[in-house]
Image (tube, helix red, strand yellow):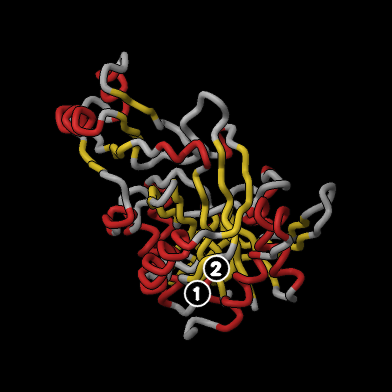
Amino acid sequence: MRVLVIMDPIERVNLKKDSTMAMLWAAARRGHTLGYALQDDLFIDQGQAYGQIKPLAVFENSKDYYRLGEAQTERLASYDVILMRKDPPFDLRFIYTTYMLEQAEREGAWVINKPQSLRDCNEKLFATQFPDLMVPTRVTSNQALIREFLAEHGDIIVKPLDGMGGMGIFRLQVGSPNIGATLEVLTNLGQSPIMAQKYIPEIVDGDKRILMINGEPVPYCLARIPQDGETRGNLAAGGRGEARPLTARDRAIAAKVGPVLRDKGLVFVGLDVIGDYVTEINVTSPTCIREIDAQFGTSIADDLFAVLEQGRAH
């Protein structure tokens, strides 16, 4: 297959952790041809989607892990699969990119993940479609409603709807100092809705990332365990990653969410689970492949490509 990756600059990736590189290495091992582009390289001309695309070769070598050829203008639909692996923020630029990718999709390319679903499925709000899998949750820009929620539950987490890597996540308890200031900043003085969730004490055992491939769970998850004194397990916030087999509850959650992901064309997704509850459903550029592979000898990117090679009918 011809595989196009749209990602952040390849020269800046963290080689030890980057899931996109795992995908590219798997594609190369399996004999696929690779192309590389940044968001800014995509354009539409006369109703067709194009890119200034560079041929890409990748090597499993920390000192010399990629080579790029000369950029050529190509139709995006000349690629069988397009991997949209641009990290958040999910901003207007990202949204415009999904429109260009949607045009490529109309012309026959298979975009992972489906552009419309990238727009539709905000990583925080999407989880609210599964209320029976969530802790008590409220989404609002109204400070009074958040204070009411805090009074009801006593101990809550508040976070922006567009954050990543644990940014902007705060724990508030009844009587906490600076509740008003925290909510003013997070809601932008009542202009932006945020998410409030009842605090889940099981966070001390880890915020689990369950990877889903075409609606089916990878049999191991990565528990991201907070540092002492920290409420966030995110690796970007200093959490420690410990791979574990899925529990029966993890599998039950995956079985409930999986068919919805498949229906929405969300082929590679990361569920965030704390204790028995889903907290987020990550669709834009899920990670943690490398950490699980390293600890359990899996090759999750090969599992992904095995699905992609079968084509969309499967």
Q: Reply above or below: 241 against 296.
A: above
Q: Reply above or below: 95 against 261.
A: above
Taking the spot 51% from the left edge, 49% from the top edge, the residue there is: 208
Marker disc for residue 110 = 1
Taking the spot 70% from the left edge, 72% from the top edge, the residue there is: 33
Q: Position of residue 32 (x, y in %)?
A: 70, 74
Q: Viewed as shown, does residue 14 lie left or right of 224?
A: right
Q: Position of residue 286 (x, y in %)?
A: 53, 54
- Find disc 2 in the rendering and name its residue: 82
* Contact check, label 2 and label 1, Cβ < 8 Å: yes
Q: Secondary structure at mark 1?
A: strand
Looking at the rendered structure, the kind of residue marked 1 is: Trp
Between 219 and 304, the one lying in front of the other is 219
Between 127 and 31, the one lying in front of the other is 127
Check disc 1: other Cα within 10 Å, few if <14, some if 14-19, many if 20+: many
Taking the spot 41% from the left edge, 47% from the top edge, the residue there is: 90
Q: Residue furthest toward the front?
A: 248
Q: Viewed as shown, does residue 105 lie left or right of 127?
A: right
Q: Earlier in the sequence, mark 2 or mark 1?
A: 2
Looking at the rendered structure, the kind of residue marked 2 is: Ile
